[in-house]
Amino acid sequence: QVQLVESGGGVVQAGGSLRLSCAASGSINRINAMGWYRQAPGKQRDLVATITRGGTTNYEDSVKGRFTISRDNAKNMVYLQMNSLKPEDTAEYYCNANIRGSPWTAGIDYWGKGTLVTVSS
């Protein structure tokens, strides 16, 4: 099976920075798109940023210019550098990846268990 494990969350003051990491492991033939989502208390899970295998990125409007998504295909890792953090960025952050287990199967979406980011004012 496949596992996604996030790390790097924590408590930071407004204006500070954090770097989230997500490691994919298990039966992996190819990782297609990867991304980060977040869910604040009482709200739905929303897209933060995505990155294709080739490196094309997409960001939610409120994080453009502050967050940077990147990946290391050799290490099956995806990262989210978060700068100029705001209290409204407080949420559980989830890693997502579309992973193919073999050359003959379609990709399946997997999710990590999340890492909590708290931004204090």
Image: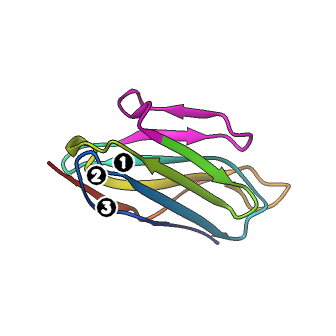
| Kind of element beneath mark 3 | strand
The magenta stretch spans residue 20? no
Q: CA distance from mark 1 to mark 2?
A: 6 Å
- Mark 2 or 3, nearer chain start: 2
Q: Magenta segment: does it hold 66?
A: yes
Which residue is identified by label 2? 91
Q: What's the residue type where badge 3 is placed?
A: Leu
- The residue that appears at 85% across and 56% down in the rendered structure is 103
Residue 67 vs 114, above or below: the answer is: above
Name the residue carrying label 1.
38
Foreground residue, 107 or 6?
Answer: 6
Who comes first in sequence, dot 1 or dot 2?
Answer: 1
Tell me how far mark 1 sits from mark 3, CA to CA.
Answer: 9 Å
- Disc 2 + disc 3, Cβ < 8 Å: yes
Farthest top residue? 61
Q: Quadrant of residue 105?
A: bottom right
Residue drawn at x 41%, y 37% is 66
Q: Is residue 14 above or below residue 21?
A: above
Tell me if label 1 and label 2 are in contact, CB under 8 Å: yes
Q: Earlier in the sequence, mark 1 or mark 3?
A: 1
- Residue occupying image coordinates x 51% and y 61%: 21
The segment highlighted magenta reads: 46-67
Q: Secondary structure at mark 1?
A: strand
Circle 1: residue type: Arg
* Depth check, front residue: 77 or 94: 77
Quarter the N terminus occupies: bottom right
The residue that label 3 is drawn on is 116
47 to the left or right of 109: left
- How many numbered marks, from 0 up? 3
Is residue 111 depicted above or below 34 in this figure? below
Asked whether the residues under the numbered discs 1 and 3 touch, taking CB atoms below 8 Å apart as contact, a structural biologist would say no
